[in-house]
Amino acid sequence: MTKPRRSVQFQHRGSNGHHGRRPSISETSEAVSEPGSPGPKMNGISEASQEERERAPQSDYDKKKQTFITRTIWTLVMIAGFFIAMFAGHIYVIGIVTAIQIVSFKEVIAIANVPSRAKNLPFTRSLNWYFLGMTMYFLYGESVIYYFKHIILVDRVLLPFATHHRFISFMLYVIGFVFFVGSLQKGHYRFQFTQFAWTHMAIGLINVEAHFIMNNIFEGMIWFFLPASLVITNDIFAYICGITFGRTQLIKLSPKKTVEGFVGAWILTIFFGYAMTNVLMRYQYFICPVNDLGANIFTGLHCDPNPVFLPQTYTIHLPLLLHQPPLTFSVAPMQFHILVFASFASLIAPFGGFFASGLKRTFKVKDFGESIPGHGGITDRMDCQFIMGFFAFMYYQSFIAVYRASVGGVIEMAVQGLSAEEQVEVLRGLGKYLVGQGMVGPEVGECLAGVLAKRRR
């Protein structure tokens, strides 16, 4: 007797008559014979794979290539814009410096800002910009009054602002200070005082140093262009020397900086500075102080050159043992000064960049902003320029500037140091002198004497 089978299940056909049975040979051959007509499932798979390939992230090589192209394009744009502004006139370069310091201030303030708290303190950002505007009013006013005394001090409207400029600036600061104290709110003291201190630090490191860069422009375009170009070329030379034979790390804040690149860039920057100085000294547009803000490369400037740009003869007495006559040569003193400029740009100015790197690491940001595509923020490109421009001004004023009596200086002394009667006497005496020297006609002297006589009555 046979045992019944257990757990035996029979497949049931579906309603379509194909489910649960083996496909026939004709059906199989039909499916194989139409490869160009895939089913819905195959279409979905192919479309999904295509979308995945399109959405696939770029490789590191593609990213670096795109960044390099963007960085190169914007570098060329910045260089072209800089030279166009420099040749167009000093006023355009001043405009660029102004824009740079405003954007740099904005970037530095932004990295320390806490949006959640700033939202509850609407006057915090307003006070930041108020102190910036007040500082720029004071610094720009100082420069304009100093370099354009002969225009400002003879204008009836501008004279009161010029003579009381510092007091007006101080009172503007006091207004901001009082408003800050009045805006303090409980629970936000630490944040508000941090913002207050951070604002003053940004003004000191950016705007005050940018003020001296502007003064360099007024003293002569060479004192602006030469320091800036030394910093830029030193950065390039450091990169080339670093990737060529750099081995020893220079500083932990910038792991890619090497001692070999640092020293090699110093030597090459000295050669570049020497060559560039030889070129710039030949053009009065670069070496003359600004006496006309409308001047450009085509109209030029005219002045008596600073003695530092004129060749001088030097004699070196050789030791008597050599029995050789003294060695005589001619060179402009500026060629010696450029050694100091190039050394500072190579050995000290990079620490402005290291300082900025430490600041970014403190707040855990890669760049100060995204003002320049491929480069980051304006501050990322200008971190070394501020301290270099400050040094250039101090060095120029200490060792190169020639202090002479100027028209503006004489007018300032007469306006601020003499009474009205004494000013009239100076004018009468000056008129007689000009007539006696034949520089003006007698009729001019008579007219001047008549006007002054009527005034005394």
Image (spheres, helix red, strand yellow):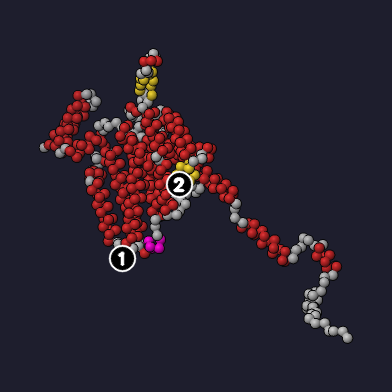
The amino acid marked with disc number 2 is Lys
- Residue 341: mark in rendering: none
Q: Where in the figure is residue 74, as x and y percent of width and height?
A: 50, 45
User: Callout 1: helix, strand or loop?
Assistant: loop
Residue extending furthest bottom?
Answer: 1
Whichever of callouts 2 and 1 sits on the residue coming sooner in the sequence is: 1
Q: Which label number is shown at residue 186?
A: 1
Where is residue 414 shown, x and y percent of the image? 19, 36
Identify the residue position indicated by label 2 in the image: 252
Type of secondary structure dominating the magenta stretch: helix
Left or right side of 172 for 25: right
Residue at (82% x, 62% y) in the render: 33
- Quarter of the picture containing the N terminus is bottom right
Image quadrant where residue 163 sits? top left
Magenta stretch encompasses residue 44: no
Left of 380 or right of it: where is 196?
Answer: left
Instruction: Work out whether residue 326 or residue 319 is closer to the camera in this orientation and state it.
Output: 319
Q: Amino acid at mark 1?
A: Lys
Which of 35 and 426 lies nearest the eye of the viewer? 35
- Residue 105 shows in the view: yes
